Every structure is written in C-alpha cells, then in structure tokens.
Image (cartoon, grey):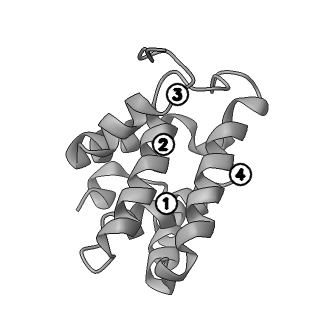
Amino acid sequence: MATSEHSVGFEPADRLAQDRDGVRRRFWIKFKQVVARLPFAEDLLAAYYCAFDRETPRHVQVALLGALAYFILPFDFMPDVLPVLGFTDDAAVLATAIRMVASNITGEHREAARTALKRGVETADLED
C-alpha cells in the first residue's frame, strides 16, 4: 500500500527528518504560530536543542528530528487546528522520542528552552 503526503504514515516525516535545515526553518515557523497552545512547549524546545547539538549522538539526533518533523508536518493523524486534541498526537510522538533518548537531553538543553520561552521565542535569537 503506497503512502501519500497526506497519509497517517511516517514516510513524509522520515524524508523531512533527513533535511536538517528544512526541519529547522519550518520548526520555528510552526512553533511561533502555536506556542501559546502547547502545554509541552518546553519539552519540544529542549528536544529541538538536543537534536541540533553537535555533541548529541547521531542516533539520538535522528530520533528527535523525526519527532520534530512530525510536529511540523501540516497533515498528521490529528489535525493541529482542532482545539486541544489537535496536538495530542504530536505530544505522543514527542514523548515517545524523549523517553527513548532522555539521558541525552541535558540540563543545558532544558535551560535553553526555558530561556527561549521567557524571551518570547524570537526566531532571530533561536536559530543560531
């Protein structure tokens, strides 16, 4: 059975996870649009910082990039436009990825996430 861009499958997320710059750019666009509605914003940002940290092992980066790619996909299992329920699947994918690699998400990643949220998530500050 073939999987299309609009399917529930993970094929589009897999392809997107291979494009680190695309994930980085699209992540910030979507994150800024929805940050006020995300109860897991700090975890999502900590995962982002871990995924792009050069000290993070490659297999951990791949797992987190896959979860971040799923977050930024416009079409997923539960559309993000649905109030409350829209981000449940994103949270579940992220929680699973974080659980798998939790020992690699450092205090520095979490502190960077808290600082970014306090600053109001300004893209120019975060993309460095």
Q: Residue at x 48, y 83 (%)?
A: 106
Q: Position of residue 7 (x, y in %)?
A: 52, 18
SS for callout 1: helix
Q: Amino acid at mark 4?
A: Pro
Q: Amino acid at mark 1?
A: Leu
The reply to whether dot 2 and dot 1 touch (C-beta < 8 Å) is: yes
SS for callout 3: loop
Q: Residue at x 52, y 72 (%)?
A: 101
- Check disc 2: other Cα within 10 Å, few if <14, some if 14-19, many if 20+: some
Mark 2 or mark 3: whose residue is earlier in sequence: 3
Q: Quadrant of residue 34?
A: top right
Residue identifier under label 1:
45
Query: Which circle, 1 or 3, is nearer the viewer?
Result: 3
Question: What's the CA distance linking mark 2 and mark 3?
Answer: 22 Å
Give me the disc on residue 31: 2
Mark 4 or mark 2: whose residue is earlier in sequence: 2
The correct choice, above or below, for 99 with respect to 103 in the image is above
Q: Amino acid at mark 3?
A: Gly
SS for callout 2: helix
Mark 1 or mark 3: whose residue is earlier in sequence: 3
Residue identifier under label 4:
39
Residue identifier under label 3:
9
SS for callout 4: loop
